Amino acid sequence: MKRISLIILSIIMLCGAGTVVSAGELNANEKSVIEAISKNDFPVKIEQRYINQLENYFCTDNVQIGKLDADDFVMYLKDALNAKKNTLKNKNYQNISDTYIYFEKAGTAINLLLEYDSSVNDFYFIDGSGYIVLDFQDIIKHTDKTEANDWNISVEVIFAVVILLCILGLLINFRRWNKKMKRHNKERYEDEDEDEDELEVANRKTRKARMQTFSYRNIKQILMYFYIPIIMGVIVVVIGGLFLNRFGDLLDSMQANFINTQPLYHSKEMVYQPANVKVNEQGKNINLSKISYPRYSEQYGQLKCQELEVDAPVFFGDRGEYLEKGAGTYSGSAIPGQGKTILIGAHDTTFFKGLEKVKKGQTFTFTTTYGVYEYKVRETKVYHDGDYEKGYDLKAHTEQLVLYTCFPFGKLNGKKTDRLFVYLDKIAGPVIEY
């Protein structure tokens, strides 16, 4: 009896072992999400950076997506993108509202919150700890490039134009009135020099009466230029208010649900612990479940090159506050060992200052929390404003480290619109297995 019980228990354990996925690994449901949004027949072509960001999120510890959640995410994401398409064709309350609601539901399906960062006017999906997971702001806000170029006139602009026109009319009227007053005074002084008779006195009285009528009429006309702007301004504001009132629910909902009261935050400062191993003593492979995938804002590596005096802490994420402390990894790229493009940037006046003297063949050491990697410089290129995306390929299946910084070096006046890209090939380091 005991033998039978042990056999049954062993079978149960073996079956369970076949279905359980270790933390950090991608299960079948997560893989199905990646495959679904990567297809060409998806409502909108999802850029590779967003696919990489989502895959990076699935790689983090304690993230396991069920089948229903995966199906809901894909369904709501499709609905959101279709609603966005309709918004571009017919910009009304219903389409705009559906866009944000479906994006929010898509995030909720995989335990993400849709948040709005008012400091940079962008949308993000964040996890429960406040870490950025997806920077879907371009998909949510600008799915069509022409939308950003549409000319919209605001109530304030209309009101300002009305006031300026009224002031201009007031000045013109003052000028005309001044000319008439000068001409009248000249005639009056000429009359006083002549001998006054009864007829002239009568004429002068008639002119005075006309002048009084003229003055009253012009003063009344001048006053119109003061209260007409007020009346016109009130009309413009009322009309604008009635027009915007239709979208009041949407604006209130966005403020209540999306606009955060504080900047995107980090739950705590993670202490960077470099892998205590030498390059030649590492194994060739390392399982994803054995490493802790970096979360947004965490330092997970140190990049060094003795020849160039480069020694930069490397953070996961490339927001401004991280670039003040070191180099930032674009979250839409990969990390060392994944066999993909790793895109890292830093300021040319601080941590990447040494790249000014970079040469082909120089070696960089990238020490992460899970292994030590070495990369050799292959080439460098400079790209101009608007062509930055040509400087890297996020779809590449060969691991390469791409470093970029502002160019030219040492220039402090004016805005730097060029970027220097340094391309390095991997020469050592373990491969992360999924």
Image (cartoon, rainbow, N blue to C red):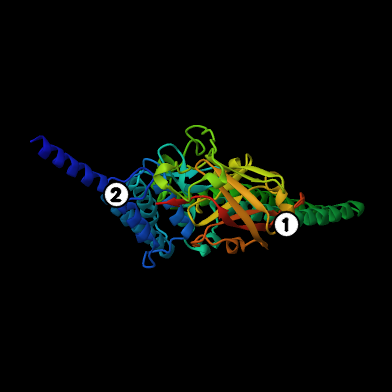
The answer to whether residue 262 is above or below residue 398 is above
Q: Measure how far apart labels 1 and 2 are at the Cα level.
A: 69 Å
Along the viewing direction, whichever of 284 and 408 lies nearer the viewer: 284
Left or right? Give the position of 302 relative to 139.
right
Label 2: few (<14), some (14–19) or many (≥20) C-alpha neighbours in 10 Å: many
Label 1: few (<14), some (14–19) or many (≥20) C-alpha neighbours in 10 Å: few
The residue lying at 28 percent from left, 48 percent from top is 66
Residue 347: % across, % down = 67, 47
Mark 1 or 2, which is nearer the eye? Answer: 2
Could you say which quadrant of the image residue 113 lies in? top left
**Which of the marked residues, 1 or 2, is nearer the chain's N terminus?**
2
The residue lying at 14 percent from left, 41 percent from top is 8
- Per the image, label 2 sits on a secondary structure element best described as helix
Q: Which residue bears the numbered disc 2?
A: 69
Left or right? Give the position of 267 relative to 156.
left
> Residue furthest toward the bottom?
41
Query: Are circles 1 and 2 on residues that touch, CB within 8 Å?
Result: no
Label disc, if present, on residue 172 of the rendered structure: 1
Along the viewing direction, whichever of 128 and 178 lies nearer the viewer: 128
Amino acid bearing label 1 = Ile
Residue 141: % across, % down = 47, 55
The answer to whether residue 7 is above or below residue 424 is above
Residue 92: % across, % down = 40, 58
Residue 73: % across, % down = 33, 52
- Per the image, label 1 sits on a secondary structure element best described as helix
The residue lying at 48 percent from left, 63 percent from top is 144
Q: How many marks?
A: 2
The residue lying at 91 percent from left, 54 percent from top is 194
| Quarter placement of the N terminus | top left
